[in-house]
Image (spheres, rainbow, N blue to C red):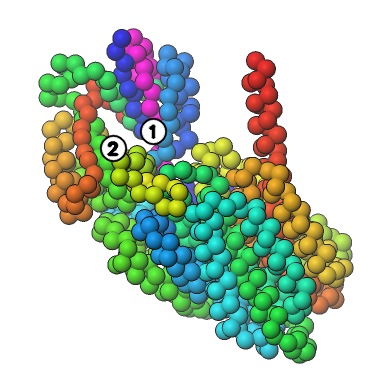
Amino acid sequence: MELLKKLKEVGSSIVPILVLVALMHFFWIPLEEGMLSSFLIGGILIIVGLAFFLLGTDIGLLPIGERIGSASVRTKNLLVLLSTGLIVGIVIILAEPNITVLQEQVASVNPSISTTLMVIMIALGVGIYLMISLLRVVFHIPLKWIYLGSYTLLFLLAAFTSQEMLGIAFDSGGAATGPLAVPFIMAIGLGVARVQKKQEESDNFGYVSLALIGPTLALIVLGLFSKESGTTLLTTVSTPVAGNFLSLVEASVSQVVRSLIPLILLCVVYQLVLLKMPIGQLIRVAVGFVYVFLGLTLFFVGVNGGFIPVGYQIGYAIGTLDSRLLLLAGLVIGSITVLSEPSVWVLIDQVQDITQGHIRKSIMLVALAIGVGLSGFLAMLRVITGLSIWYFVLPVYAIAVLLSFRIPTLFVGLAFDSGSVSSGPMASTFILSFAIGSSVAVGGNPTTDAFGVIIFVSMTPVVIVQLLGLLYKHKQAKLAAQKGRT
Amino acid sequence: MNSTLLLVITESGKADMLMSIAKQAGSTGGTVLNARGTASSSLLCALGLGDSHKEILLTLVSDEVKDQVFAALSHAPHAKGLISAIPTMLTEQGRDATEGWDLVNIICPTGYGDDIMAAARKAGAGGGTIVEGRGTAKEDDIAFFGSTLVAEKELVLILLKKGLADRVLSAVSNLPCMQQKGSGIAFTVSVQAFTSLGA
């Protein structure tokens, strides 16, 4: 049965973290009393939650997203298609739970920034870039040119924008591509591609990574007009507490309900005006939404009650032991946590489907694990040395954009997309709290050194997957050469 | 020389293994399609718990090796599913038989498959398999900025005992969502041989 299969799949990706932390607890760094048990309970909640979430996206989110995408193209009205892009982009950001989390983080660190204005800008950024993605597919513009243009513009503007906005801008892109936005945006893209006769595999990708550029650009533009506030940033971070799962349920339920309502309203409007799906299909989609609700709620309870506090603890403990060990720990934790990102599983499933099994799940998982492992390493390097984020972000994205001119087109969008999906709720909770904990331990400034880890998580996989594409190209060339000889 | 189309529906990931068995037994090649199996219980289906990823293996074999391949496939280890043989030329025997099995094919717009299965179940069918496809272009093709738009279709496959097929067909064609002109087509094919795999 599908639910059992998902449980097994997700379980096998989360259990390694549970085992790793348990081993560390018994042989190396003992955690505080009761921490391990709440971590393990959290892990189980996350496994069950993810399984339900994936089942729900399969029968609810993905089908309706695809229908909305294809129905909009079918109207043969460019205006309808573009306004679908804009509206879906804006609504999905209002719905995305990751954005709510970011809003709270920013408000606690820097009260001088208006978070309402910030969310409006992020929503507009995603909406406009979703429109650009749709235009790109309709007019067949290669993705690499859009990446080149967008990132050039982004870095040019970034040189002039206010420094405090910069870190938030980079992280907002990572947050915008969270567990609700990724499957929905990808589904819209699939739907649009599906009704076109000349289907290109590469047309299915690129939506998510462009949705990551949008908010970053929008906030950098916002930063151009806002003056340096000059307020001192808060440098103290409250230590998160473990356990307390019951009290977290209520908060998680209301958070997830608040997220899903705009999305459901959007689907209802499209069903009444454009889709007109038969009743059986409607029931399925509705049940899917119920599963998504259940899954996300369990996931957030598990993450907040178990993973965030333990991540902080481990980071702090290792940091006080020996800061050099942090580099190794960053590598290991990065490569293991990416396997438990919900959106990563959605992406690799679709990759396997779209490429008809040529790019298998295991290969993508290994590539992403290596990529995010490297991110963890680099992020820890930054926590220890306090180097500016520029030394890391600029060269990596420069390499990524240049590489995109040398590899098969399919891999361009795929690579940028895998980067964006890697930075999901797991990165913004477990890895970020690990970074904050270690930063506090080595005596650094967590707001400048630890934040920004999300953008790290979403940039290294881009390069790694592109290298995978380069390898694939050479292999194909070799095969062709062999065939030519015989 | 007559040939027979062997249609195997099995769990996801098993089709390649079955194809190699078929090749050893004399088949020359085949095609694998991705499909979605629907549950035989209405409740599980409504809860979305009954779906499973399936693979369909189509292989066309000459009548000389047909029985050999069929036997090899039906004794394949570690695979669950069903296998049916469909003659490509109608024989007298196939047309008049009152016993045996029919394969019902329904082609409908994407998204209607589950409603069709629900109606089919009420009329006595068990489970079914849904394959995604696209309609090939008609003359009055619609173009949108240089790219031709195609219709998304689903193909619903249901294997039934002879006699049930008519009831299922009429139940499906009476569905409210199938009343509009051009909603889809349905037809049955007589199946020569049928067996369950891994039962």
Residue nearer the viewer, B155 or B70: B155
Q: Nearer the viewer, residue A307 or A201?
A: A201
Q: Is residue B60 magenta?
A: yes
Q: Residue at x 53, y 38 (%)?
A: A357
Say which residue label 1 marks.
B56
Which stretch appears magenta?
A: B50-72
Residue B73 figure quarter: top left
x then y, percent, for residue B175:
17, 51
> What residue did someone put label 2 on?
B157
Q: What is the total number of numbered labels drawn onto the structure image? A: 2
- Marks 1 and 2 in Cβ contact (< 8 Å): yes
Q: Amino acid at mark 1?
A: Ile
Mark before the other along the chain sequence, 1 or 2? 1
- Cα separation between marks 1 and 2: 11 Å
Instruction: Tell whether A25 sits left or right of B48.
Output: right
Question: Position of A206 compared to B127: left or right?
Answer: right
Q: Position of residue A155 (x, y in %)?
A: 74, 67
Above or below, comparing residue B184 to residue A95 in the picture = above
Q: Which chain letter goes with mark 2?
A: B
Percent position (x, y) of residue A318? 81, 65
Quick one: SS at disc 1? strand
